[in-house]
Amino acid sequence: MQWIIGACGALVVAGAAYWKQSLSFTGLLAAVMMGTVYFGAGNAFWFGILLLFFISSSLLSKLHHENKAELEATYDKTGRRDAGQVFANGGLGMLLVLLNAIYPLEIWGFLFIGVMATVTSDTWATEIGTLAAKPPRSVLTGKVLQAGTSGGVSLPGTLAAAAGGALIGAASWLLRAASGMQHHSFLLLALAGLLGGLAGAFADSILGATVQRMNRCTVCGREVEASHHCGQPTVYARGWRWMNNDAVNAVSSILGGAVALLVSYI
């Protein structure tokens, strides 16, 4: 019955997101499968955190969306998430849900908080940072960059990342209590989310500035993530060819999860 409830709930939420054009059709299918596993193999803690990330990120992606159209043209993926993005953001969490169902350990919960805090922090930082009045600066050199450039950070984006991570940690405390899971202090979980999210978000920026695959537009000469820009195919510019945006998200999520787990020990 729990799996059926999870499937129905996931279908409703993902269907609404598809209707609002926050998900592509492949993204819809992936989200339904993922939500079913989160609730069926987990409980309100796992499923609730996934919903919090998904709903908050979808709402932020619509904030002043008309001003983001030019920037989205430079990204490998747009605001309408496909299956690759869905799994890049929630796939590691789903693996942790299954591991906890097979062999319950407290470490899976803290890793999950860090992973979900990372994807939330990174998404919030991107959505808010692109609206900042001042241009971002390189996370490595401090040099002023064009808005939307990989590896760029800003004060509004950093504050948004901190808020997103802290929210995941705070919500974890509430949802764990509601699910009857082992009690941890509010401060511990909030710190795990905050520090895990910030670590993951900055790791994402560092990877974007160093090893993420970037292409160059043959028309305007701009360095972009997208395979097409200005109506023409782009050419390889730098980075590891396999390290696309989804791979960067996955690596940074692992690092964020590790930091959250470290916080639980300290």
Image (tube, rainbow, N blue to C red):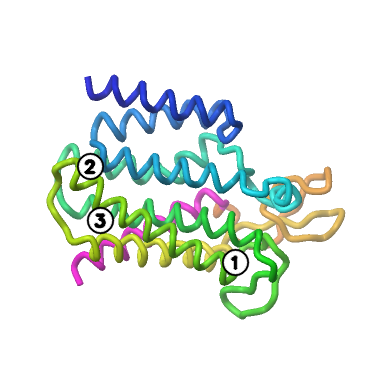
Q: Residue 238 bears which disc, if any? A: none
Quarter occupied by residue 62: top right
**Residue at 62% from the left image edge and 57% from the top image edge:** 213
Q: Label 2: how many residues lie within 10 Å, few (<14), some (14-19) or many (20+)?
A: some
Residue range of the region highlighted in magenta in the rendering: 244-266
Mark 3 vs 1, N-terminal side? 3
Q: Is residue 169 above or below residue 5?
A: below
Q: Which residue is mark 2?
A: 99
Q: Label 1: how many residues lie within 10 Å, few (<14), some (14-19) or many (20+)?
A: many
Q: Which residue is mark 1?
A: 151
3 or 1: mark nearer the eye: 3
Q: Is residue 139 above or below residue 212?
A: below
Mark 1 vs 2, N-terminal side? 2
Q: Label 3 sits on what residue type? A: Phe
**Which structural element holds mark 1?**
loop
Q: Which residue is mark 3?
A: 110
2 or 3: mark nearer the eye: 3
Residue 75 in the magenta stretch? The answer is no
Residue 44 percent location from the top left of the image: 26, 38
